[in-house]
Amino acid sequence: MEIIRLRNVGKSFGGIKAVNNINMDFLSGRITGLIGPNGAGKTTIFNLIGGFIKVDEGEIYFKNENITNLSPWEISKKGIGRIFQDIRVFKKLTVLENVLLGKSNAGEYPYNVFLRFKEVGKEEKENVERARYWIKFVGLEGMENTPAENLSYGQQKLLSIARLLMGEYEVLLLDEPTAGIHPEIVKKFIELMRKIVENGKTIIFIEHNMNIVSEIADWLFFLKEGEIYDMGKPGDILGNEEIRRIYMGLSDVKT
Amino acid sequence: MNYIFHILIMVFIYGILSLSLNLLVGYGGLLSLSHSAFYGIGAYATTLLLIKGVNFFPALIFSIFFTSILSFFIAYPSLRLKGDYFVLATLGFQIIVFSILYNWVGLTKGPYGIPGIPRPKIFNFELSTPFHYFIFSGIFFFIVFLFFRKLYNSPYGRVLKSIREDEIASASLGKDIPLIKIWAFVISCGICAISGSLYATYVTYIDPTSFTLDESIFIMSIVILGGSGNLKGPFIGTCFMIILPEILRFLGLPDTIAPNVRQIIYGLLLIILMKYRPSGIMGEYSLQ
């Protein structure tokens, strides 16, 4: 089933077409990769799906519901979560606080804090437990009370992944999830991506490491100058001489 | 002794004001210049009811609700504005409120002010001395302090902090940013009304000059100086800003220049503090 559909989507920035009349279907339970040179429009597509920038033309559907130009929080509530290329953890907040923010809680509304404090307290307790699980999962245990700004780049990235996993989203948009992360954790993360997808969830990711792309992607879109240049199974796309030429430095990738 | 109680009462009243503004500045990252307007609205709402013979507590509750509801109508359009534009919107509101308080003579007696505001009564016991009022305002300060402590340590406080840090990331996690900010504004302004009510009934006279833009800036400087983003900062800031000018009185300066020199010393101290402690005395969050 197509969980996310883009129909004739276009977006311009000051006369430059960042995304030009794109039609894309993302199947549920699959890992789909967006690849292409810098400036191809990959992150712009994520921003359009997530509602972070307005769509100029066309529509975006999530499970047959038109979500074009909803605000980011509404789209997130519907079940599409993302991590950012530039990480965006809350630097002054602790690791635990960051991860806790990944999940909604009745206590996010001030009247519940006072009127339904028992419920809020119980929910918070459960959330803390879950948050600790994900913190441990990404290997940040023992750092729960460390402010995020004291973490290294790679650790911040792991933190943003833990925060995303806390949210139990149906669709995960991952913008360069493995850049700057230790290979051991990358391995673990790849396993996790597979597990997530086995549970019926959907992953769309942007990645420059073609070894990872060829290892986990079920389907690839190759973008160039805001348009879909080619699509297909990783073997076909990465084996295409023309694409290798456009995407320099790929000749040593085994396909 | 009464002089000391007077200073401490002012610390409590401004303490409540700065705690409430801290919710916006320190937690929500929202600079509001209309705090003294809401302080004034609270003071006038309570006063007008008191002189009609309403008891203090019903008047106080009405004034909190009235101020909160009014603040909602300000927050709703202005919180859609970003950063500097929000500051300008609150500045505009501050000027409008002052203008209304000053010119609606029929209701507020305008520049003449309202004298003879009755002191609160608790079961026929009138709070007549500064000591009574010290205890009374202290209890309110304590309750407000506990209220904010509960709020800051709740998931709501966490979400507010996340908005201050990075709105886009917070929205990506499904946080309804406009609604959460509106709540912060409404709560903050509602609490302001408590200060207004305490001030009016303590001084027993109010006029619009107590609720000017200068006052808003003063409250803002308390929060920034004390350090926003936690509970201690605003309190320390209040002690500093209220008590310091009083201490400077004892410098023994000649009467002709004393007020000016005090202002200069006061201004210099602010500059020095901001230079060496940009996030305030106790602050964990700098406004840069």
Image (cartoon, grey):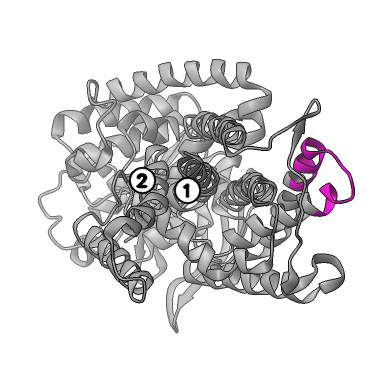
Q: Which of the 4 image quadrants contains residue A82? A: top left
| Residue B59 is one of the magenta-drawn residues | yes
Q: Which of the 4 image quadrants contains residue A18? A: bottom left
Q: Residues within 10 Å of mark 1 (few under 14, many from 20)?
A: many
Q: Which residue is mark 2?
A: A233
Where in the figure is residue A8, as x and y percent of width and height?
A: 57, 66
Which amino acid type corresponds to the residue marked 1 in the rendered image?
Asn
Chain part drawn in magenta: B48-63
The residue sitting at 85% across, 66% down in the picture is B107
- What element does badge 1 sit on? helix
Which amino acid type corresponds to the residue marked 2 in the rendered image?
Lys
The front one of A19 and B99 is B99
Where in the figure is residue B30, as x and y percent of width and height?
A: 49, 57
- What element does badge 2 sit on? loop
| Residue A198 is one of the magenta-drawn residues | no
The residue sitting at 29% across, 25% down in the picture is A144
Same chain, labels 1 and 2: no
State how far apart marks 1 and 2 are (Cα). 54 Å
The front one of B153 and A220 is B153
- Predominant secondary structure in magenta? helix
The front one of B124 and B209 is B124
For the C terminus of chain A, give its image quadrant.
top left
Q: Which residue is mark 1?
A: B22
Q: Chain of mark 1?
A: B
Q: Which of the 4 image quadrants contains residue B253? A: bottom left
Which residue is farthest left?
Answer: A252
Which residue is farthest bottom?
Answer: A15
